[in-house]
Amino acid sequence: MNCVELLSRLIEIPSVSREEKAVADYLEQILAPYDVKRIGNNLYMMQPHYDAGKKTLLLNAHIDTVKPVSGWQREPYKANREGDRLYGLGSNDCGGGLVTLMKTFLEKREETLPYNLIFAASAEEEVSGKQGMEMLLEHLPRVDAAIVGEPTALKMAVAEKGLMVLDCVAHGVSGHAARNEGKNAIYEAMDDMEWFRSHEWGRTSKWLGDVKTSVTMISAGTQHNVVPDECRYVVDVRTTDQWGNKETLEEIKRNIKSDVVARSTRLNSSGIEETHPLIKVAKEMGMEMFGSPTLSDQALMPFPSVKLGPGDSARSHTADEYVKVSELEDALTLYSELLSRLVL
């Protein structure tokens, strides 16, 4: 089965985050001849001649998708090829990376490389769930580096921003809206929101720029004539290698009046040293490099990693998502050359 045929089949098996069982069952079945192992809805394969004395490279992509948005003009769970484009939910994010990395692993599986090779298909990436990469890593042998097959237009993402979601509460005093009484919690929140909008963080990352904070949800008030005594809002925070999540949270708490609770601080920014062998090979191949604003399973990897895959991140989570067949072909060529040149 070639990459287009496999990806077409995967598109037609719904695999929204935390509902990946059917697609994991299918992959487990077709990969059974290659000694595939399953942890929950995660799957991985190792080279049969794994050598604990060598370093190990992980090839990873995720099997889950977001829910289809309302603007689809095509059937999201039907693979639809139109010329060079293959439409379908998950085709770009990140089915293209999944099938091409899987194909690359199977072609390299019997080769004697100067490192071990592992392929892993992970679940719950779109929700940063604890039953995905975080759980899978507990069962893998030591990993020294990874290539994550997110859609990067086959450019190498050498860093990515981290993520925190903050639940904030501004406090006021209730009163009658017709009289000059009370303290409006919305106005209290507005001062803090302006800080989030305009704060200058001072330390700028070479690849990722500045920390980005965005107020994305707000809720306050019970009726039109009551001054609200509480305003709740949510802030999306994208951190960098210059500002870790915990340090960023402390800076926020020092500067705003609202109560702040982070849902999690575990999804930190990730990056790789410019002297790493993966970067050396990428430079030799003339590969373009950049810093990615979007989160991936890299955030859960305690070892050097890069994102590199077919497709375009701008198509992810959009109606009529697609990947180009030519992008899949180019990815196979690029992955093969990179792995042949690499020495960890």
Image (cartoon, rainbow, N blue to C red):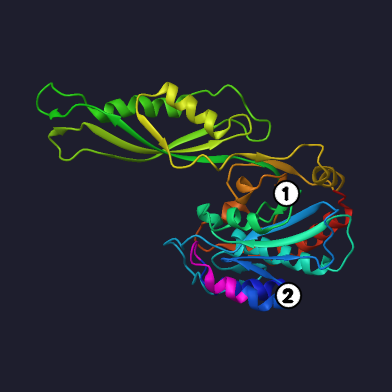
Q: Is residue 67 visible?
A: yes
Q: Position of residue 194 (x, y in %)?
A: 39, 26
Image quadrant of residue 310?
A: bottom right
Quick check: 58 above or below 278?
A: below
Image quadrant of residue 108?
A: bottom right
Q: Is residue 219 left or right of residue 272?
A: left
Q: Which residue is mark 1?
A: 155
The residue under the point 62% across, 32% down is: 209
The numbered mark, 2 or 1, whose residue comes first in the sequence reads 2
**Image marks 2 and 1: residues in contact by CB distance under 8 Å:** no
Q: Is residue 83 left or right of residue 163?
A: right
Quick check: 260 above or below 121?
A: above
Of 59 and 144, which appears nearest the observer?
144
Q: Position of residue 75 (x, y in %)?
A: 49, 72
Q: Is residue 310 visible?
A: no
Q: Position of residue 151 (x, y in %)?
A: 65, 55
Q: Is residue 20 magenta?
A: yes
Q: Amino acid at mark 2?
A: Asn
SS under mark 1: loop
The residue under the point 66% across, 59% down is: 139
Q: Amino acid at mark 1?
A: Lys
Tell me where the magenta segment starts and ends, as one range: 16-26
The numbered disc on residue 263 is none
The residue under the point 59% across, 59% down is: 93
Image quadrant of residue 107?
A: bottom right
Q: Is residue 12 magenta?
A: no
The numbered disc on residue 2 is 2
SS under mark 2: loop
